[in-house]
């Protein structure tokens, strides 16, 4: 009796048969992530384009022309429109109307060109444009402010230059790794990290908690099956399931979403194995604590939410409050998201990411031993 | 050497004492019946003896081996069939057998041979490919027993093995137990059935954590607490049995009276003979059909012991 993983083979034998009897659970676990990926990958575009914009151009009103606005203000507004950030859907003719559109939520941005816009420009005074931004969506607001002020800057520089002159400095930004700046490219590697939690944590936790509910776990405790054997025997089939899911997700990313994978898929797979391992260990730890499937589900949801909010999947870690930033180091998904984005988007390899792999495997081993200890204490 | 022995075995859950200083001694080859109302601590005792639950205080030995010190050696010797049969409903009979055989570290030829044997011994041939969840109670129980015996244990713990099983299957299981006990296996069985208790070679009765009786069925029936000096027992048959009982209980000559089927089992003052009892009852308008002297049954014994214990506990608190 010196094999600490005694009984592994027996548990594995049984677990594979449980899975065969319940293909729906596995299918469910594989199909849900794919569905989520399709929904999030196609429906959510976090790049801000075509913001509904209302314009009150007072500059032309002095001339009483049929078309509102002066030629200068129209040129400026055209540039705004060409930025692709703003979509001008309506021109209004009073401050009150402008406000009404914003308050009603029909417009996210309201632009007012004042009466003396042309006159100020011609005199060489500073002309003003008022940009009212609905701050209730901070992403949209930020982008609107940025684009409008850079347009203003651009316009000012151009007027200061002598005709035919050139800007002293031209900044030429070039996106290196995601040239089209497509958000699915950025979103899906992160999403993969979150989705892999589902099959691993949830299914392993359930498989042991079910034995508690049925009372079969006590029967197991009187056999020579050791806690480590029990856990590894339970983990292995779900490790395989997790690997299958990983493969499906990668294939979807590559061939359905056409996201180029710049690094080595093998490196990604090896590092992902570490991530699967941590999640399976978390599942085990949950099952050592929970006594019912409902309880286990709640604990899994906590893991899921922490992974979504702290890992950098939803919010950039750099802008988190200090406590959240520190806590994000304890969330395995943080390391996995760095791995996935690194390999897929930047072509990073083991040289850059080995430390993430080490952290994940170490976390997994630690949690698994903790769970084994808890199972051991459950019996004598 | 005793097959099972405990010394002041105690288990607490927080402040609640589930088992209080229970000392038990079971000889090899005995069929030991462990009885008591629900929630009295029967399962808790079994879990401590099988090493599933830690012992709070006291000691326990299986075939001389200390359970707390050497649980692995104990587990090689014991089998356990828990209250719910502990089978995997979504696995077939064969898969359940395969799993338990592997869990007990059987391999290769020995594994195949042992499974074959178990199937034959329990007549499971027709059901090997059926899901365990689809078996009837009796067959489930046979399969569970087969699984628990896979590693040839010498002490077997069965927790309410016949709960919810039809009478024929019940009878068959007990026949099987005696056959195995003939081969030297010791049984520790909990049950609520008196006919099963009656067949045990040794009984103990636990009442809310306290072990209050221990001995052969005959010894328990003839306990002085069950047969208080100055009383004797009669079985009284009468129509309208509940009304009869109510009226009887008003009479001072009754020490105790309980309905059993269509008759009353009564503990009556010794000074009142069989004929006088009949006269007294008829005087009260009870149409007595028959009165017979009665040797106490096991159930009488347990009811008597429980009531006395309950009274003591009420006085104490
Ligand atoms: N894990 C536990 N935690 C707290 N109380 C328990 C636990 N297990 C059993 N008990 C309590 O111990 C008492 C004895 O239970 P049990 O041994 O199952 O009784 P029996 O098998 O005789 O019906 C009951 O009151 C039960 O509620
Ligand atoms: Mg019980």
Image (cartoon, rainbow, N blue to C red):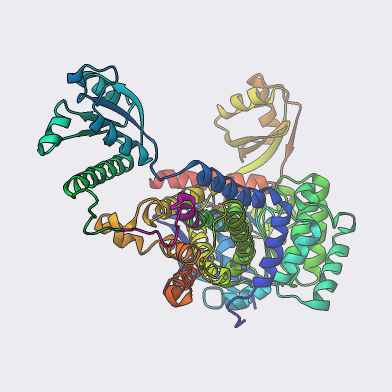
Nearer-the-camera pick, A46 or A117: A117
Label count reads: 0
The quarter of the picture where residue A8 lies is bottom right
* Left or right for A309, reference A30: left
> Which region of the structure is painted magenta?
A172-189
Residue A205 % position (x, y)? 55, 56
Q: Residue at x 79, y 50 (%)?
A: B138
* Left or right for A281, reference B302: left
Residue B244 % position (x, y)? 65, 24
* Left or right for B110, reference B70: right
Nearer-the-camera pick, B258 or A37: A37
* Left or right for B53, reference A11: left
Residue A56 % position (x, y)? 25, 25
Nearer-the-camera pick, A113 or B3: A113
Position of residue A265 relative to residue A50, above or below, is: below
Q: Residue at x 83, y 52 (%)?
A: B130
């Amino acid at each position: 009796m010196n094999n600490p993983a005694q009984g592994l083979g027996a548990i594995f034998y049984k677990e594979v048969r449980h899975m065969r009897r319940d293909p729906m659970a596995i299918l469910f676990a594989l199909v849900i992530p794919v569905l989520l990926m399709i929904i999030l990958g196609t429906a959510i575009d976090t790049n801000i384009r075509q913001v509904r914009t209302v314009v009150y151009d007072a500059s032309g009103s002095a001339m009483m022309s049929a078309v509102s606005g002066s030629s200068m203000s129209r040129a400026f507004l055209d540039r705004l429109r060409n930025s692709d950030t703003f979509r001008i859907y309506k021109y209004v003719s009073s401050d009150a109307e402008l406000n009404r559109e914003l308050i009603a939520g029909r417009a996210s941005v309201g632009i007012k060109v004042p009466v003396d816009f042309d006159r100020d420009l011609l005199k060489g005074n500073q002309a003003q444009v008022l940009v009212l931004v609905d701050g209730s969506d901070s992403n949209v607001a930020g982008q609107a402010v940025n684009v409008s002020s850079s347009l203003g800057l651009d316009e000012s520089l151009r007027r200061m230059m002598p005709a035919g002159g050139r800007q002293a400095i031209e900044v030429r930004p070039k996106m290196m790794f995601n040239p089209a700046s497509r958000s699915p490219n950025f979103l899906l590697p992160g999403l993969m990290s979150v989705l892999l939690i589902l099959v691993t944590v949830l299914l392993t936790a359930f498989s042991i908690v079910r034995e508690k509910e049925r009372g079969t776990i006590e029967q197991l405790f009187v056999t020579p099956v050791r806690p480590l054997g029990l856990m590894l025997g339970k983990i292995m089939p779900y490790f395989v399931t997790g690997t299958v899911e990983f493969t499906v997700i990668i294939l979807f990313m590559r061939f359905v979403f056409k996201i180029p994978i710049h690094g080595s898929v093998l490196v990604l797979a090896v590092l992902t194995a570490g991530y699967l391992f941590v999640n399976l260990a978390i599942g085990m730890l949950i099952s050592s604590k929970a006594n019912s499937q409902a309880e286990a589900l709640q604990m899994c949801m906590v893991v899921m939410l922490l992974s979504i909010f702290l890992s950098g999947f939803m919010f950039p870690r750099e802008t988190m409050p200090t406590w959240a930033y520190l806590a994000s180091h304890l969330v395995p998904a943080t390391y996995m998201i760095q791995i996935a984005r690194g390999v897929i988007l930047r072509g990073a390899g083991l040289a850059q990411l080995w430390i993430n792999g080490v952290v994940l495997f170490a976390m997994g081993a630690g949690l698994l031993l903790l769970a084994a200890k808890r199972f051991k204490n459950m019996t004598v | 050497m005793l097959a099972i022995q405990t010394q002041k075995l105690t288990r607490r859950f927080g402040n609640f004492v589930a088992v209080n200083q229970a000392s038990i001694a079971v000889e090899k080859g005995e069929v030991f019946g462990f009885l008591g109302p629900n929630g009295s601590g029967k399962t808790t005792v079994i879990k401590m003896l099988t090493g599933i639950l830690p012992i709070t205080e006291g000691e326990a030995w299986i075939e001389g081996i200390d359970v707390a010190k050497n649980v692995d050696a104990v587990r090689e010797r014991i089998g356990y069939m828990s209250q719910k049969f502990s089978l995997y409903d979504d696995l077939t009979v064969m898969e359940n057998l395969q799993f338990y055989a592997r869990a007990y570290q059987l391999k290769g030829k020995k594994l195949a041979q042992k499974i074959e044997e178990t199937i034959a011994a329990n007549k499971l041939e027709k059901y090997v490919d059926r899901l365990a969840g689809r078996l009837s109670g009796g067959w489930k129980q046979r399969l569970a027993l087969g699984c628990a015996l896979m590693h040839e244990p010498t002490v077997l713990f069965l927790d309410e093995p016949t709960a919810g099983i039809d009478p024929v299957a019940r009878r068959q299981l007990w026949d099987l137990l005696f056959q195995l006990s003939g081969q030297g296996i010791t049984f520790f069985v909990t049950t609520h059935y008196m006919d099963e208790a009656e067949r045990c070679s040794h009984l103990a009765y636990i009442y809310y954590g306290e072990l209050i009786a221990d001995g052969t069925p005959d010894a328990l029936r003839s306990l002085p607490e069950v047969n208080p000096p100055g009383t004797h027992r009669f079985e009284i048959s009468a129509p309208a049995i509940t009304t009869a009982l109510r009226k009887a209980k008003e009479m001072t000559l009754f020490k105790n009276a309980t309905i059993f089927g269509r008759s009353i089992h009564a503990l009556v003052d010794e000074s009142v003979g069989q004929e006088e009892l009949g006269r007294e009852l008829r005087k009260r308008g009870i149409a007595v059909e028959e009165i017979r002297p009665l040797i106490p049954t096991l159930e009488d014994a347990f009811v008597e012991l429980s009531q006395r214990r309950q009274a003591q506990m009420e006085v104490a608190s």
